[in-house]
Image: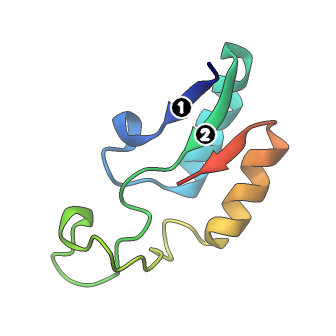
């Protein structure tokens, strides 16, 4: 079975591209194959928004992912990992 890293327990639903990419570099030597961005990437920018109440909106949080999910995925692939959401 491949080893999967899920960011939820390090970001607690507030993932940020720069933070995730730093972690991606660290997990490569551990044999991780898949790097999953879990909850919080889709949270819209509005007062009192929370990922758990915006399920299904699927609007990328622009300040968390300034290069978009595609940009983050390219960088994750450069680490040798398979990105997923």
Q: Residue at x 44, y 74 (%)?
A: 61
Q: CA distance from mark 2 to mark 1?
A: 5 Å
Q: Residue at x 73, y 16 (%)?
A: 29
Closer to the chain start, of discs 2 and 1, is 1
Q: Measured from the top left, where is residue 20 in percent x and y?
A: 56, 45
Q: Is residue 9 above or below residue 12?
A: above
Say few, some or many: other residues with alpha carbon within 10 Å of mark 1 (under 14 / 14 to 19 / 20 or more): many
Q: Measured from the top left, where is residue 52 in percent x and y?
A: 21, 62
Image-based side of 22 in relation to 43, left or right: right
**Residue farthest top in this picture:** 30
Q: Quadrant of the N terminus?
A: top right
Identify the image quadrant of residue 32: top right
Circle on res. 78: none
Instruction: Confirm or deny contact between disc 2 and disc 1 (CB under 8 A).
Output: yes
Question: For mark 1, what is the residue?
Answer: 5
Image-based side of 71 in relation to 47, left or right: right
């Amino acid at each position: 079975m491949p080893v999967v890293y899920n960011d939820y327990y390090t970001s607690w639903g507030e993932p940020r591209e720069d933070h995730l990419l730093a972690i991606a570099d660290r997990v490569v030597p551990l044999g991780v194959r898949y790097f999953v961005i879990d909850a919080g990437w889709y949270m819209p920018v509005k007062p009192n928004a929370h990922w758990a109440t915006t399920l299904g909106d699927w609007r990328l949080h622009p300040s968390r992912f300034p290069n978009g999910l595609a940009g983050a995925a390219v960088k994750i692939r450069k680490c040798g990992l398979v990105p997923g959401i």
